[in-house]
Amino acid sequence: MPDEPTRTDRRRERTRAALVAAAQTLIAEGRTNVAVLEITQLADVGLGSFYNHFDSKDALWDAAVNDALERHGALLDELTADIDDPAVVFAHSVRLTGRLHRTTVELSKVLVNRGVDLTHADHGLAPRALRDIEAGVASGRFRVRDTTIALTVVGGAVLALGALLHADPERDAAASADEMTEDILRMLGVPEDEARRICALPLPDLEAVTGAA
């Protein structure tokens, strides 16, 4: 049985979490060319604490993005855990991601500002999306020659939608996400009527999970 974390362990974890949260805020604002002192001030921790956890700012940025991706991916997994149809799982994940661009703006901006290098990361959203595409192919729901190419297209579309929604605050995020998802499903080989039906299905209660207003 693993040892219980000590008070020192818990304090270190709180400090690291504060640094990661500060980094996510700075990335979301597009401000990565800042001094370590500014990061620690935003995190409300001592300057020396930074180097107890990270060798460099680049290491902190990577940790911040990885944390954001994992939280986002874990939320999607939770919301689609009880769905059997791979096409619906995939569509729900894409549709929910479109809505998360509005309901969790800081997380969305972290993802958008890191750009397409996240499309083929080995953690977070990319492996989950690839898993769902491959499940759709295996079940016969999707017809795809190259799942990696399909992932590239899907990832680019999702990131571009986030950028569009941030640039146009009046745009209906839900309608835009559903329309984009319907087009993606058709690209993956789902018939038009079926893609429309899937994208009209009710979604899990996002606000109940995220606490969004």
Image (cartoon, rainbow, N blue to C red):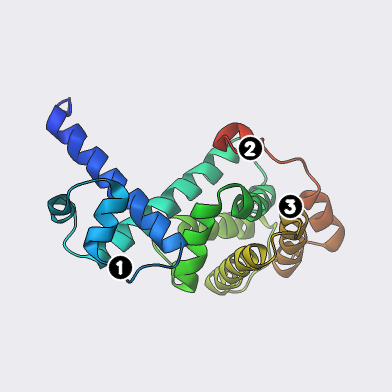
Say which residue label 3 marks: 174
- Front residue of 79/63: it is 63
Badge nearest the viewer, 3 or 2: 2
Q: Quadrant of residue 26?
A: bottom left
Q: Is residue 123 visible?
A: no
Q: Classify 78 as above or below 133.
A: above
- Residue contact between numbered discs 1 and 3, judged by CB atoms under 8 Å: no
In what quadrant of the picture does the C terminus appear?
A: top right
- Residue contact between numbered discs 3 and 2, judged by CB atoms under 8 Å: no
Badge nearest the viewer, 1 or 3: 1
Element on which disc 2 rests:
loop
Say which residue label 2 marks: 213
Ranked by sequence position, the earlier of labels 3 and 2 is 3
Ranked by sequence position, the earlier of labels 1 and 3 is 1
Q: Position of residue 78 (x, y in %)?
A: 53, 38
Say which residue label 1 marks: 34
CA gap, disc 1 to disc 3?
35 Å
CA gap, disc 3 to disc 2?
15 Å
Residue shown at 23%/62% (left/top)? 36
Residue shown at 18%/54% (left/top)? 50
Kind of residue sitting beneath label 1: Val
Q: Is residue 173 visible?
A: yes
Q: Position of residue 161 (x, y in %)?
A: 65, 65
Badge nearest the viewer, 1 or 2: 1
Kind of residue sitting beneath label 3: Ala
Residue shown at 42%/50% (left/top)? 70
User: Dot 2 surroundings within 10 Å: few (below 14), some, or many (20 or more)?
Assistant: few
Element on which disc 3 rests:
helix
- Residue contact between numbered discs 1 and 2, judged by CB atoms under 8 Å: no
Q: Position of residue 99 (x, y in %)?
A: 65, 51
